[in-house]
Image (cartoon, rainbow, N blue to C red):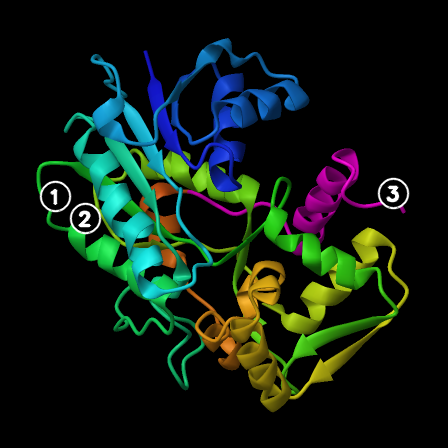
């Protein structure tokens, strides 16, 4: 019988995978800091929490007999104040969880496109053969984790590097929708930026495909087509029923804003993506990856387009009362 351990079960990708696996009859083990939050989320979604066993976030406190057959390690810090906070969770804690798992478990680790960095200059897309050039502490922590995982020779580990992920239960896009409802929408930089993206449903299916993959990777996964920053904002506006206009902001102004955000704690909390470190990823104009190798190895295919992913995210926010119904 399949038993799945999921870190990040109350987050974005982990929560979506957990719900999919519960519906398929899988028994779930979930290391979480807040078991009440996990149970409340399951109740809101209409799922019975009996198939989910919350665990202490620290594996040394687990009861004996924890032997999952599969695992998704998706929890991590997206926005932190300094390098040490990123590495403490994204590297050290994740490795402690891994060490507590049986060597027979099939493990998928969700890394990030940030571990590789932006698309190399003059290239259409970044591939697995390109040298890694992470720009931020977040990206560097994900790369450090990947390198540590490659030392785990006796384990069945597959590393996935998704790009921007969109879809239901994604709290990170709430500011995007709120901006989309305003009269003035802003985008950083005067030049058009191009990105890979992936819906969370497609990420979940990629994870399920990766459990059978023998190659550790890292493997890039992405939708077939790319999107631009203009397209992202305009599509979010259509999903939310926004009627405003989009104005580009010069990069020099955005850099000045990042200095201000870093110096004021309340701004760091409300706009974590604009801290000086995380804002480094805004300057690059191309974050495009090629997922051909993973598709050929597994037969996995992306299914949802940008509109479907954002419409799903918007409907989720409306259901939970964070946004008004259009």
Give the side of residue 218 with respect to residue 310, left or right: left
- Distance from disc 2 to disc 3, alpha carbons, whole Å, reads 44 Å
155 or 40, nearer to the observer: 40
Disc 3: which residue: 325
Q: Which residue is mark 2?
A: 149
Point out the image quarter for the N terminus.
top left
Q: Which mark is residue 216?
A: none
Residue at 63% in and 81% down: 192
Q: In screen coordinates, is 39 left or right of 179?
A: left
Q: Percent x, y for residue 109?
A: 32, 43
Mark 3 surroundings: few (<14), some (14-19) or many (≥20) residues within 10 A: few
Is 272 inside the magenta-drawn segment? no
Name the secondary structure under disc 2: helix
Query: Residue under circle 1?
Result: 152
Marks 1/3 in contact by CB < 8 Å: the verdict is no
Q: Nearer the viewer, residue 294 or 187?
A: 187
Please rate how many residues cluster around mark 1, counting C-alpha atoms within 10 Å: few if below 14, some from 14 to 19, many from 20. Answer: few
Q: Vertically, is 41 above or below 299?
A: above
Which portion, as a residue range, is magenta? 300-326
Q: Secondary structure at mark 1?
A: loop
Label 1–label 2 contact, CB within 8 A: yes
Could you tell which of marks 1 and 3 lies nearer the N-terminus?
A: 1
3D distance between C-alphas at marks 1 and 3: 48 Å
- Image coords of residue 86 (percent x, y): 35, 57
How far across and down, in percent of the image, does residue 78 sit? 45, 55
- Residue 46, quarter of the rendered image: top right
Provide the secondary structure element on which disc 3 rests: loop
Disc 1 versus disc 2: distance between alpha carbons?
5 Å
């Amino acid at each position: 019988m399949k038993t799945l351990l999921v870190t990040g079960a109350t987050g974005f990708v982990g929560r979506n995978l957990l719900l999919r696996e519960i519906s398929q009859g899988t028994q779930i083990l979930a290391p979480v800091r807040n078991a009440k939050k996990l149970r409340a989320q399951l109740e809101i979604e209409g799922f019975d929490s009996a198939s989910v066993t919350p665990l202490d976030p620290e594996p040394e406190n687990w009861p004996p007999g924890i032997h999952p057959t599969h695992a998704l390690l998706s929890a991590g810090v997206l926005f932190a104040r300094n390098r040490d906070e990123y590495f403490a969770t994204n590297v050290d804690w994740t490795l402690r969880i891994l060490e507590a798992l049986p060597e027979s478990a099939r493990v998928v680790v969700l890394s990030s496109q940030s571990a590789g960095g932006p698309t190399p200059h003059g290239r259409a897309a970044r591939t697995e053969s390109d040298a890694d050039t992470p720009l931020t502490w977040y990206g560097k922590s994900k790369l450090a984790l990947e390198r540590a995982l490659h030392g785990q020779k006796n384990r069945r580990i597959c590393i996935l590097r998704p790009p921007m992920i969109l879809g239901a239960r994604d709290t990170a896009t709430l500011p995007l929708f709120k901006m989309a409802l305003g009269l003035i929408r802003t985008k950083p930089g005067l030049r058009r930026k191009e990105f890979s993206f992936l819906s969370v449903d497609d990420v979940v299916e990629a994870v399920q495909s990766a459990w059978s993959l023998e190659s550790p990777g890292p493997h890039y996964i992405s939708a077939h087509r790319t999107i631009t920053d203009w397209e992202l904002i305009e599509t979010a506006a259509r999903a939310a029923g926004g009627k405003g206009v989009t104005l580009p902001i010069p990069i020099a102004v955005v850099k000045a804003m990042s200095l201000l955000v870093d110096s004021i704690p309340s701004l760091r909390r409300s706009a974590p993506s604009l801290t000086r470190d995380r804002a480094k990823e805004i300057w690059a104009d191309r974050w495009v990856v090629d997922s051909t190798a993973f598709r050929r190895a597994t037969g996995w295919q992306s299914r949802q387009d940008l509109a479907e992913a954002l419409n799903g995210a918007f409907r989720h926010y409306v259901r939970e009362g964070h946004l008004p119904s259009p």
